[in-house]
Image (cartoon, rainbow, N blue to C red):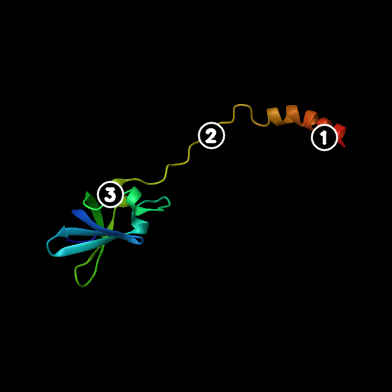
């Protein structure tokens, strides 16, 4: 196994900071909470459950063969890309209504 490889593993435990994974009998790993999703993760349980089998990307290997794993790199659950917004009317409605609003405000004073 090397960095960048895709591995399958079973979620064995979930803590507030990450999820522990059993890849095989002798190799364990951790998915840090920052590697769950590109978006904000309030609760890892919203994404993973104990017993789930998942595909993960190896992002690091320690000297004692503990894996650092990424769920988001394999499962592509990143943030939505910005959508282009086309203004149909631009500032025309503002220019049209602003004098009415100012006049209405002045009458209340």
User: Which structural element holds mark 3?
Assistant: helix
- Looking at the rendered structure, the number of numbered marks drawn on it comes to 3
Question: Which disc, if any, is residue 37?
Answer: none
Q: Nearer the viewer, residue 10 or 60?
A: 10
Q: Earlier in the sequence, mark 1 or mark 2?
A: 2
Q: Is residue 7 visible to us here?
A: no
Residue at (27% x, 49% y) in the render: 74
Residue at image location 34% in from the left, 53% down from the top: 44
Q: Is residue 15 above or below residue 8?
A: below
In percent of width and height, residue 98 lies at: 76, 31
Pick whichever, 61 or 40, lies toward us: 40
Whether residue 31 appears in this view of the structure is yes
Q: Is residue 57 left or right of residue 96?
A: left
Q: Residue at x 20, y 54 (%)?
A: 10
In this rendering, which labeled residue sits more in front, label 1 or label 2?
Answer: 1
Q: Quadrant of the C terminus?
A: top right
Indicate which label's residue lies in the foreground, 3 or 2. 3
Q: Residue at x 68, y 31 (%)?
A: 91
User: Could you tell me which secondary element the residue under label 2 belongs to?
Assistant: loop
Residue 98 left/right relative to 81: right
Q: Gap in Å between the C-alphas at discs 3 and 2?
A: 30 Å
- Locate the N terminus and report the quarter of the image it occupies: bottom left
Q: Is residue 96 above or below residue 60?
A: above
Q: Label 1: how many residues lie within 10 Å, few (<14), some (14-19) or many (20+)?
A: few
Would you call the spot at circle 3 few (<14 residues within 10 Å), some (14-19), or many (20 or more)?
Answer: some
Q: Nearer the viewer's eye, disc 3 or disc 1?
A: 1
N-term-proximal mark, 3 vs 2: 3
- Which mark, residue 85? 2
Figure check: 90 above or below 50: above
Label 1 sits on residue: 105
Q: Which residue is mark 3?
A: 74
As drawn, is 38 to the left or to the right of 85?
left
């Amino acid at each position: 196994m090397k960095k960048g490889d895709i591995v399958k593993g079973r979620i064995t435990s979930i803590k507030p900071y990450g999820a522990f994974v059993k890849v095989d009998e002798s190799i364990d790993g951790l998915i840090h909470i920052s590697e769950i999703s590109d978006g904000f993760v309030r609760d890892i349980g919203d994404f993973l459950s104990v017993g789930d089998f998942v595909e993960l990307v190896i992002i690091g290997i320690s000297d004692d063969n503990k894996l650092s794993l990424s769920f988001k790199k394999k499962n592509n659950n990143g943030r939505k890309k910005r959508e282009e917004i086309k203004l149909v009317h631009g500032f025309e409605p503002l220019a049209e209504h602003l004098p009415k609003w100012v006049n209405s405000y002045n009458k209340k004073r």
